[in-house]
Amino acid sequence: MTTLDRRPALEAVSTGRGLEALRPEWDDLLADADGASIFATHAWVDAWHRTAGAAEELLVLTAREPERGLLLGVAPFSVATRRAGPFRIRVLRMAGTTGAAGDHLDLVVRHGHPHVAAELWRFARQRRSWDLVDLDGLRPGSHLGRVMLRRRGDREAHVTRTACPVLHLPGTWEEYEASLGRNHRQNLRRYARKLDREAGGPVVERMVVAPDEVEETVAGLARMHQQVRTARGDRGSFADPAMVDFHTRVALRFLEAGRLRLHRLDVDGRMAAAISCFRHDETISFYTTGYDPALSSYGPGRRIMAAAIRSAIDEGARRFDFLRGDEPYKRTWGAADAWDDRVRMPAGARGRAIDLGLSAIRAVRTTVRRSGAR
């Protein structure tokens, strides 16, 4: 029997202390994993567990080589308790998603050990304490999607797609700029000249590289983001104060690891815009941004986005990932279609009963809405 034929040693981690203990091994595993995502890093999951995900039960499953104890795989799950109508529901999720919305997720499986995925999912099912499975942001062709759907088929699983547009970067900024639509290219230049001319002080684009400046920049980004979003009638990503803490922790950890790309635009010594991006392998992922609405006539949001894309090209990245959401502005920057999956299905008899009940409630609500529209 070869090493690949043997079942790995499996273990469940459910505490913050246990999660912290995995940190060095997790990062080593991620560097040798298939299809790894920046949102599957230990830094992301740990920061989320300490802040936005503090109310959820951690369920991180590990698989190790029996002889040497080498970490072969990690299943970063969490279990959330929710209420929907008369139902109290326990839901299995990917850790690091609730509130934070990570993308391109999967089990973290060491290259050359695909059998580990099925073992991790089997172990998860043995420990089942949830009614529904709702795994959002799974990368196409994920290990997890494969083993889940192979077992359950299409009878109970409901799979939907989420747009995650991605920009494939050329070798130079000049080549990229020439690929943009004429109006977009001209607006970038016109707004930049206008701000430089009318700012009343220095206009500086820069990347935050000092730890003691990260907290100030993230707080400013969050404040500006909320000002813009609430003015539009949206809740905004930072309505929950825990999200500011989460982003600060993630930024500091990513800065330490060389993954943070936090850009800011300063006008006359004051922050006018900021954008938070992360690097993993050859991809820069754009996560969130904010700008001073008082300066909206100068296009600070466009300018800081251009700065982030230019920086990505200059450092040799191959992709600029706009992540989830099919907002039209992403196509303006040249992003092409890409997709993630969301897999939802009931677990056990109680889960099936709840799923049927929720489907009935949704059907009634849809009927009422349609009746009221007539």
Image: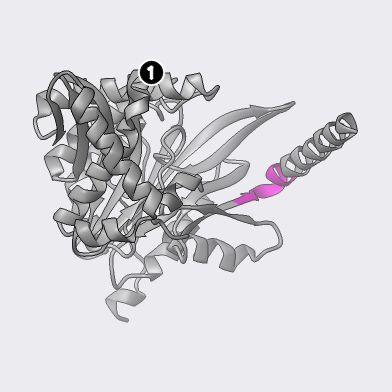
Q: Secondary structure at mark 1?
A: helix
**Residue 255 showing in the rendered view:** yes
Neighbours of disc 1 within 10 Å: few (<14), some (14-19), many (20+): few
Q: Quadrant of the C terminus?
A: top right
Instruction: Tell whether 16 sits left or right of 202.
Output: right
Q: Quick one: 40 or 81, which is closer to the camera?
A: 40
Q: Quick one: 124 or 85, which is closer to the camera?
A: 85
Q: Image height check: is 239 above or below 192?
A: above
The residue singled out by tag 1 in the image is 241
Q: Quadrant of the N terminus?
A: bottom left
Q: Which color mode does the image show?
A: one colour
Q: Is residue 155 magenta?
A: no
Q: Position of residue 48 (x, y in %)?
A: 35, 33
Amino acid type shown at disc 1: Pro
Which quarter of the picture shows residue 89? top right
Which residue is located at x 23 percent, y 37 percent? 20
Which residue is located at x 26 percent, y 24 percent? 272
Q: Position of residue 345 (x, y in %)?
A: 64, 51
Q: Position of residue 110 (x, y in %)?
A: 28, 64
Instruction: Tell whether 81 sits left or right of 367.
Output: left
Q: Position of residue 71 (x, y in %)?
A: 25, 58
Which residue appears farthest toward the bottom when viewing the image? 1
**Residue 17 showing in the rendered view:** no
Which residue is located at x 71 percent, y 42 percent? 350
Which quarter of the picture shows residue 313? bottom left
Which quarter of the picture shows residue 298? top left
Q: Which residues are magenta?
A: 344-352
Q: Image height check: is 7 above or below 108?
A: below
